[in-house]
Amino acid sequence: MFEFKGVTRRFGAKTAVDNVTLDIPTGQMVGVIGRSGAGKSTLLRMINRLADPSSGTIYFDGRAVSGLRGAELRSWQRDCAMIFQQFNLVPRLDVLTNVLLGRLNHRSTVTSIFNMFSREERIMAIAALERLGIEQVALQPAGTLSGGQQQRVAIARALMQQPRVLLADEPIASLDPLNAKVVMDALADINDREGITVICNLHTLDTARSYCERIIGMAAGKVVFDGRPEELTKEAVSLIYGADGALDESMTSTSITIAAAEEPSEATAAPQPLVLLGV
Ligand SMILES: Nc1ncnc2c1ncn2[C@@H]1O[C@H](COP(=O)(O)OP(=O)(O)OP(=O)(O)O)[C@@H](O)[C@H]1O
Ligand SMILES: [Mg+2]
């Protein structure tokens, strides 16, 4: 489990995260909500050490991850997969290779991209793509896919790390409601089936409410709400978003609820048979 103890991050005179103390048990699906600039990304980035706390400590299973160095830090970053609003794929590389890149940090040296990955790893990558329902685009350049497909590739790549924690920073902010639902369903399924802790920054209240068992509300770097979705009252919402802000929930809603889950349209290039991969 995670323990945050007095975690603060300053950027010059600005305090992005202000004295946050909280626990997150293993296996929880947590949504972090708040206005732009509330400190959501900074909080997430301190977990996998893309940012370091100015003060305070983050523990995972009793070990201070905020103090790790060298090989221990690399091992922790392997345990913590992260997905981003903008997917962060290599657009010209095919989908399968993008997914296999999730294995890179399991290796100490990079030799050649062609003999770098074992047969087992390629089988694992295809299984990850199948799980996300996008195996048919395995050989297409990642840049030719729809946003929803690209985010699913990013999730498959994250799974290749065999992480203990999945961090998602606004994973659906660039997606239409249908693709947003597919991506959130995938994160919920990973949380449910693998028991991996998922911490997900979200702009939209309704998404956090429907997918997360726990919601952490941030305002000006502080945690101003921490509870179950049903405890998120109008008063709590105004604490998080400000009295002038999003009392009208439509302002923070993407209407992710969709009657029928139809598949997002596939990119046009014809899929090639997986036999070419030699698996
Ligand atoms: N690298 C940085 N240098 C300077 N200031 C930063 C840096 N990163 C974040 N900040 C500041 O810290 C505060 C919190 O930023 P953060 O990105 O964590 O907010 P956020 O809640 O993720 O916002 P958004 O919803 O827009 O993504 C903001 O005022 C931001 O300008
Ligand atoms: Mg952010």
Image (cartoon, rainbow, N blue to C red):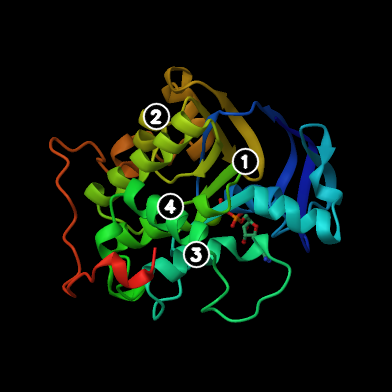
Residue 128 in the image, given as x and y percentages of width and height: 41, 51
Which residue occupies 17% across, 73% down? 270
The amino acid sitting under disc 2 is: Arg
Q: CA distance from mark 2 to mark 1?
A: 23 Å
Q: CA distance from mark 4 to mark 3?
A: 20 Å
Mark nearer the N terminus (4 vs 3): 3
- Category of crowding for the residue at label 2, using alpha-carbon neighbours closer than 10 angstroms: few (below 14), some (14–19), many (at least 20): some
The amino acid sitting under disc 3 is: Leu
The residue pinned by badge 1 equals: 164
Asked which secondary structure carries label 2, the reply is helix
The residue pinned by badge 3 equals: 100
Q: Is there a contact, CB below 8 Å, between mark 2 and mark 1?
A: no
The residue pinned by badge 4 equals: 171
The amino acid sitting under disc 4 is: Pro
The residue pinned by badge 2 equals: 209
Res 227 visible: yes
Mark nearer the N terminus (2 vs 1): 1
Q: Nearer the viewer, mark 3 or mark 1?
A: 3
Where 250 falls versus 138 (above or below)? above
Q: Is residue 201 left or right of residue 205?
A: right
Residue 167 in the image, given as x and y percentages of width and height: 56, 47
Near-viewer residue (269 or 73): 269
Where 276 falls versus 71 (above or below)? below
